[in-house]
Structure formats: C-alpha cells, structure tokens
Image: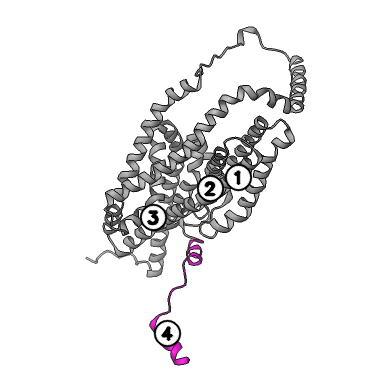
C-alpha cells in the first residue's frame, strides 16, 4: 500500500514571514493589554492618592526629601561617619533648616494676621476705587438676575459652615495631626538614608546580568543626581531672591522683612502660581504698611521685575543645562499634584516629574503613536542624544594616544 501523499512544506522564507506575522500579532496584543491596563491605572491612581493622602502625602514628601539629601549623606559617609549617624545628622540639618524657615515666616505672619483688623480701614481706603467698580458691577449683575425667573422658596437651601473661633483654635485643632505626620515623615527619611548604601548595593547586585546591574546603577545615580541638583539649585536661587526682596522691603520700612523674604522663597518653588501669590501678598502687605496706594504697589512691582529676570534668564541658564523639562509637562504635573494634594502637592510637582522622567528615560516611555501606527510599545527616541550631550567627552584610548604621538 502506498504511503499517503505528504503535503509540500512551505519554503523557509514563507515560514519566516508567518512567524514574524505571529510575533507582530502577539506584540500588538500585549501592547493592547498594557495600554488598557495603563489607562485604567491612570484613572484609578489619582483617586487612590487623594483618598489615602494621610499616608501617601507624608511618605512621598519624605522620599523626595531623602533623595535630595543623599549627596549630603554620602559626603558624611566619606568623612568616616557610620550610616546611622550620617542619616541622623542629615535629619538634624533638615530639621534646623525647616525650623528656621517656619520661625521666620509663621510667627511674624501671626502678628500680621492679628494686625489686619486694625489696618483694614486703611486697606479699604486705598482700594476704594476698585471697590466702587466691584459694587457697580455687582449692582449690574443683580439687575440682570432680577429680570430672570427666580426659583421657588422650596428650592432654597441654607449651608452653615463651622469655622474655628480664633487662631488658637485653628492651631490646636490641626497641630496634633500635623505633628504626627511630621514625625512619621522624619522616620521615613531617617530609615531611608540609614539603609541607602546597603539598599543600593543589594538592588544592583541582585540583578541577573551585568547589563541589568549597570542599568540599575545608572538609573539610581541619575535619579539622585537630577533630583538633588534641581532642588539644590532652585533652593539657592529662591534663597537669593528672597534675600533681595527682604532687603528691599526692609529699606522701604515694612515690618518683618525676613518673613516676606521667606514667603517669596517658599512660594517660588511652585511654578506659575507661586509668584502670583507672592505678588498678591506683597501688595496686601504694602497696603497695610503704607497709607499711599502708589507706594504700596512698589514691593510687588519690584518682585515681579526680579521674578521676570530670574524665571527667564537665571533659572533657564543654571537649571536648563542639567534638567530639560517640557513646560507643558510642568503645567500638567503642577495641576495634577495640586489637585491631588493641594499646596504640598504643588511643591512636590517638579521633583516628582524629574524622578518619573529619569526612570522612564531608562526603562522606556509608552509609545502611543508607535502602537497606533507601527508596531512599537516603548521608545527611547531622543534620550540617547540627551545623554550624549550631558555626558563629558570620553578620554582618548591608548591606541589613539599612540597614533597621535606617532603623527606628532
């Protein structure tokens, strides 16, 4: 009996095409699942962060501060301090700086708040033209609303808000919670710094390949360098700006110049919104301090001029050479973290953006355009050029030096 006829096997080229087609289908399926999971996390994470702000906020702030303190920790360790003592010293330095900032801002601010009821008449006289304009606009809006059909009395609801009766009630109600969160954050900073050297070593050595260990070490170093460089540089710029503003308001005769300088320095960490708040507070302080409104607007106008020079010349020149961030990403990060965690989130927006950008630069960013129009899932486009531009020129090899000497 003859053997059954065997079907002709496809050529090797056709088999390779089929295998490549199957691989592409599999990659696109995995990319689809990854994209769907990413979109789900994108919508779920903000609400989880807001709901768990009492835990996530101090932990995140502590980790950002600890990363920024790593260079100081390594400096202490190079001087022979053990990791625990070096970490404790870093925490003491941070506490000293924070205590100085709070004492120079909060205590004078309480005196200014107590002084506000006495000076409210002067502020009202200075703002009389603006108040008249607002009153006329309010009357115009009331006339328009009166011509519209009003809702019935049954739809009217009364909302009663209970507020603290004094500054003392506000402090006593919020201080215990703030102190607990501060203590928890300090513990996170201390334990992170005390175990930093061992944790970094174990993270690198636990990789399965030399290339993975090298990539991990590079990412850790880049995250620490980018975060500490940005925060250190911006802190120096903000302190100089606050010192100049303090000197100007002191020369003009305003009370508590150190407080005004500290407010400017702290709020300048928040892009876009912080300088606006500083200018408004300086205008209010000027109206409280000076009877003449034209003299009162001099401090905010000077600050606006200084901030314009700092934001458009000094900061891009100093920070832009080391940290490249898209302004649109800054605005989106600021809006997102301010919505999630308020003012503290706005202060953490740029450091968190730098950390995420550095990690994505090493791991690869999701390539939405490649997923839609090609077959890509991750991309590193443009990151090699940034690393080449930021890295110093490599030293010449022995062969190059020898050939140069022969040519010489």
Circles 2 and 4: CB atoms closer than 8 Å: no
- The mark nearer the N terminus, 2 or 4, is 2
Q: Distance between the residues labelled 1 and 4?
A: 56 Å
Q: Distance between the residues labelled 3 and 1?
A: 31 Å
| Dominant SS type (magenta) | helix
Badge 2 marks a residue whose secondary structure is helix
Badge 3 marks a residue whose secondary structure is helix
Tell me which residue sits at (42%, 41%) in the image.
Answer: 61
Which mark lies nearer to you, 3 or 4? 3
Q: Position of residue 76 (x, y in %)?
A: 33, 55
Tell me which residue sits at (43%, 84%) in the image.
Answer: 400
To which residue does mark 1 refer?
247
Q: Distance between the residues labelled 2 and 4?
A: 47 Å
Which mark lies nearer to you, 2 or 4? 2
Q: Where is residue 68 in the image (x, y as percent from the top left)?
A: 41, 50
Circles 3 and 2: CB atoms closer than 8 Å: no
Q: Distance between the residues labelled 2 and 1?
A: 12 Å
Label disc, if present, on residue 71 of the rendered structure: 3
Q: How many marks?
A: 4
Tell me which residue sits at (61%, 11%) in the image.
Answer: 156
- The mark nearer the N terminus, 3 or 1, is 3
Does the image show residue 247?
A: yes
């Amino acid at each position: 009996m003859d053997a059954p006829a065997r079907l002709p096997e496809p050529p090797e080229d056709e088999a390779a095409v089929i295998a490549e087609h199957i691989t592409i289908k599999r990659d696109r399926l995995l990319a689809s699942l990854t994209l769907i999971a990413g979109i789900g996390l994108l919508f779920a994470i903000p609400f989880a962060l807001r709901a768990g702000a009492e835990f996530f906020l101090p932990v995140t702030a502590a980790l950002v501060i600890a990363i920024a303190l790593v260079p100081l920790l390594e400096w202490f360790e190079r001087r022979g301090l053990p990791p625990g003592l070096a970490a404790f010293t870093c925490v003491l330095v941070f506490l000293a700086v924070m205590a100085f900032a709070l004492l120079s801002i909060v205590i004078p601010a309480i005196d200014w708040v107590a002084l506000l009821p006495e000076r409210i008449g002067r502020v009202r006289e200075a703002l009389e033209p603006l108040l008249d304009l607002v009153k006329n606009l309010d009357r115009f809006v009331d006339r328009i609303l009166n011509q519209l059909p009003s809702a019935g009395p049954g739809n009217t609801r009364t909302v009663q808000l209970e507020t603290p009766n004094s500054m003392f009630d506000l402090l006593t109600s919020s201080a215990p919670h703030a102190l607990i969160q501060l203590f928890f954050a300090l513990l996170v900073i201390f334990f992170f710094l005390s175990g930093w050297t061992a944790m970094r070593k174990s993270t690198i050595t636990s990789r399965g390949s030399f290339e993975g260990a090298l990539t991990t070490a590079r990412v850790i170093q880049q995250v620490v360098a980018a975060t500490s460089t940005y925060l250190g540089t911006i802190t120096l710029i903000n302190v100089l700006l606050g010192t100049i503003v303090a000197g100007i308001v002191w020369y003009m005769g305003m009370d508590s110049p150190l407080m005004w300088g500290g407010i400017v320095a702290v709020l300048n960490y928040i892009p876009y919104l912080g300088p606006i708040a500083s200018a408004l507070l300086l205008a209010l302080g000027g109206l409280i301090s000076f009877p003449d409104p034209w003299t009162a607007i001099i401090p905010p106008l000077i600050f606006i001029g200084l901030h314009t020079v700092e934001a458009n010349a000094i900061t891009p020149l100093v920070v832009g050479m080391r940290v490249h961030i898209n302004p649109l990403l800054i605005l989106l990060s600021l809006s997102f973290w301010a919505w999630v965690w308020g003012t503290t989130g706005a202060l953490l927006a740029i450091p968190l953006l730098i950390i995420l950008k550095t990690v994505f630069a090493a791991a690869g960013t999701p390539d939405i355009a490649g997923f839609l129009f090609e077959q890509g899932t991750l991309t590193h486009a443009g990151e090699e050029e940034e690393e080449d531009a930021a890295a110093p020129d490599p030293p010449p090899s022995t062969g190059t030096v020898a050939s140069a000497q022969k040519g010489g």
